[in-house]
Image (cartoon, rainbow, N blue to C red):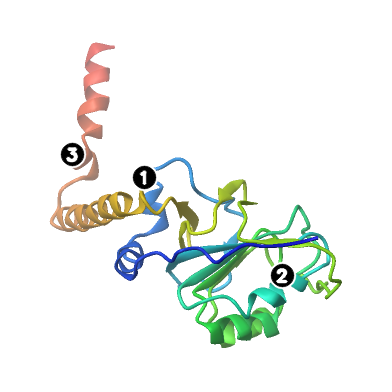
Amino acid sequence: MFIVRPMPEQIAPGLVAELEKCEVATIGHVLHSGFVDPEIRAVLPNARVAGTAVTLRIPHADSTLLHYLTAHVRPGDVVVIERCGDERHACWGGVITNAMKLAGVKAGVIDGPATDFSEIRRVEMPMWCRGPSPITTKLLGLEGAINVPVNVGGQTVSPGDAVLCDESGVVVLAPADAPTIAARAIGMQKAELELLARLAAGEKLPDISGARAMVEGKLQTA
């Protein structure tokens, strides 16, 4: 059975731009949840993209609904795919890469393998997946769901969520929370640049961070 629900409201372009200033690892200093399994890795390691989650659930070897979705995605979308535990069949290859790129899709995030990595690199389509597989899905016309909550890398993703991806991984944020998190992460990154300048000027990291005082205070009381 197929389930096809309406496309979600897109994240505001200004928020997308702010998120793309953030490193996923910086948000890792702020949050403990929202991150997909780190085994879902970047194919293009230098890419950092943010956008609106468009979700897809497709089981086993049937990618019919992924083909269908290519006619409905919009510029700024990030396609997030639950594979229902299938780590054998690659649902995303060269043709899907080109169709999504032409539609303006920002990235794909797959809880499973992909294929045709050379084509993904050639057209510079940002992709996060569990690695390559030569065994592909087929057009079986059996089942799947578009724009329902999905589980990708242990993280529940709802259609319309904000998704940020870079070489460190993928984080999913509720749109209402994303502006505050982005502002905090950008502030932390600016503070890190100031810290690096102090190190370059000769200061020692434990003096800046307070680690020296903590350790030597414990030693004195021991």
Amino acid under label 2?
A: Pro
Mark 1 or 3: the one toward you: 1
Amino acid under label 1?
A: His
- Circle 3 SS class: helix
Work out how far the residue at label 3 is from the one at label 2, CA to CA, in angstroms. 46 Å
218 relative position to 173: left or right: left
Residue 9 vertical placement versus 125 (above, below): above
User: Which of the pair 93/43 is nearer the observer?
Assistant: 93
**Which numbered dot is residue 132?**
2
41 relative position to 94: left or right: left
Q: Quadrant of residue 73?
A: bottom right
73 relative position to 69: left or right: left
Can residue 166 be seen in this snapshot?
Answer: no
- N-terminal label among 3 and 2: 2
Work out how far the residue at label 1 is from the one at label 2, CA to CA, in angstroms. 30 Å
**Which numbered dot is residue 207?**
3
- N-terminal label among 1 and 3: 1
Rendered-image quadrant of the N terminus: bottom right
Q: Quadrant of residue 117?
A: bottom right
Rendered-image quadrant of the C terminus: top left
Label 3 Cα crowd, 10 Å radius (few <14 / some 14-19 / many 20+): few
User: Which of the pair 69/82 is nearer the observer?
Assistant: 69
Work out how far the residue at label 1 is from the one at label 3, CA to CA, in angstroms. 20 Å
Residue at point 47%, 64% (across, down): 52
Measured as percent of width and height from the top left, residue 44 is found at 53, 74
**Which numbered dot is residue 29?**
1
Residue 49 vertical placement versus 178 (above, below): below
Can residue 21 be seen in this snapshot?
Answer: yes
User: Which of the pair 108/6 is nearer the observer?
Assistant: 6
